[in-house]
Image (cartoon, rainbow, N blue to C red):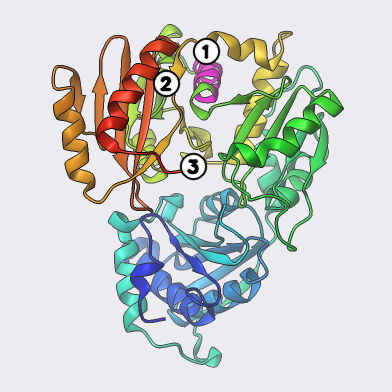
Amino acid sequence: MDDLDKVFKAYDVRGVYPKEIDEDLAWKVGHACGQFLRSLLSGYERGQASSNRLVIGRDMRPSSESLAQAAIEGITSSGAGCSNIGLCDTPMVYFAVNHLGTCGGIQVTASHNPIQYNGFKVSGAKARPVGVDTGLKEIQRIAMAVRRMPVEASVAPASQVDLWEPYRKHVLRFLRTPRRLKVVVDASNGMGGKMIPQVFGDADVKIIPLNFEIGQGFVHEPNPLVEANLRQLKTAVKRHRADLVVCMDGDADRCVFVDEHSQTVPGDLMTALLAKYFLRENPGSTVVYDLRSSRVVAEEIRAVGGVPRRERVGHAFIKKSLADGHGIFGGELSGHFYFRDNFNCDSGAIAFASALSVIAQHERSFSQLVAPLRRYCQSGEINFSVTDKAAKMQDVAQAFSDAEIDDLDGVTVQYESWWCNVRPSNTEPLLRLNVEARDEKTLKDKLKKLQAILGRPVAR
């Protein structure tokens, strides 16, 4: 386990268990997080008992319980206390950090990866994301330097804490349903299978569960962005004549929505739909969205008097932008949705509650609400395996040098009738392309020109 560069990613720690991620590494990560996150406290904060603690939660993977226990031992060996909230969705850790006032938290999870993977998502005080530029490198450095000590060397207390009731009340503040909806929820055999019954079990919503069984593997990959993983769900919506269906990922921090006609609603169109809802109650507020999003998002935000704020892809950038700009809401194409009144954090549960609230307020169906937003033609994200990413992005900029060009995240080329963004993946040796145009003919034409520069797309 000497080569930690393989498992320390841009936003988290992740790898195959037990080959790349094991209990020894979990202990070291726990110890390093305890040491690093406590070092950020002010003198006053160090005097507060809660500030000297970390929260830890875990997902349903077979390896998660033993990894969490090892991480707890590592945390307490650093001198930090630990509040163990047990089996939970990742957004519950963000809630717990704020609810308990701790200096940070760790969720043991591998999100949407296959069952043999596991890892750690780290948050700082107020659930601020800890990534490669905000402390994860320092945590890696400490983890590489420390040696695991026996359990009896732990010097701080650990306790089990049940937060489901305050968490349920927090999430349900976002649910307002004047009419009862029927919803099929595919939990992807992930943490939604525990969270949905705990939080929405008594709500005035008819929930039809799909793949709620946890701990035994996945019926389908727990990644709702892959269209093949929605097939079972789309069959269920017709069978049950549901108002909508929702598919969650493995740790339930994001979700994808499908309308009553089995048509997937992309994350950017959901951002546009939800933005109008939040802006009605908070006129003039800022809404943050990632730069891959359709122009519809900015247009809809402006139409109701809001301020659109375009941002880099990734939760660290969206959360910071939301906080810095005092925004009300944010969304990404990936199905992550962020809320000011949720500590600027993303939450699959709150996105679900908010979507139900929007749809229930109208007599029109979900598909009818979304239809006016489908006014542009989109390529979806297309991946290219490229050796020299920087050179290829420069080639794109040169090929369309008469356009409005920016480098906020990769290269964005904008014309009146179409635009594209080409950006490097943070996790894979790929360039990712998104194109949008006013009509199908323009879209096909521009895609052909871009593929001549970038090469053959990678099959997904």
Q: Which amino acid does label 3 sit on?
A: Cys
Q: Earlier in the sequence, mark 2 or mark 1?
A: 2
Q: How many marks?
A: 3
In terms of secondary structure, where does tag 2 sit?
Answer: loop
Q: Point out the stretch of residues depicted in magenta.
A: 270-281
Q: Name the residue under label 1.
A: 373
Q: Which residue is drawn at 73% across and 31% down?
A: 234
Marks 1, 3: nearer the viewer: 1
Residue 294: mark in rendering: 2
Q: What residue type is labelled 2?
A: Ser
Q: Where is residue 187 in the image (x, y as percent from the top left)?
A: 71, 45
Q: Could you give the CA–CA distance between mark 2 and mark 1, rounded to whole angstroms?
A: 9 Å
Q: Earlier in the sequence, mark 1 or mark 3?
A: 3
273 is within the stretch colored magenta? yes
Q: Nearer the viewer, residue 250 or 316?
A: 250
Q: Mark 3 points at which residue?
A: 345
In terms of secondary structure, where does tag 1 sit?
Answer: helix
Q: Position of residue 429 (x, y in %)?
A: 33, 52
Q: Could you give the CA–CA distance between mark 1 and mark 3, rounded to whole angstroms?
A: 25 Å
Residue 272: mark in rendering: none
Q: Could you give the CA–CA distance between mark 2 and mark 3, rounded to whole angstroms?
A: 22 Å
Can residue 307 be seen here?
Answer: no
Q: Which amino acid does label 1 sit on?
A: Leu
Q: Residue at x 36, y 12 (%)?
A: 442
Q: Where is residue 116 in the image (x, y as percent from the top left)?
A: 60, 67
Considering the image in quadrants, where does the N terminus appear? bottom left
**Circle 1 crowding by C-alpha within 10 Å: few under 14, some 14–19, many from 20:** many
Q: Is residue 275 left or right of residue 162?
A: left
Q: In this view, does 410 lie to the left or right of 209?
A: left
In terms of secondary structure, where does tag 3 sit?
Answer: strand
Q: Nearer the viewer, residue 20 or 394?
A: 394
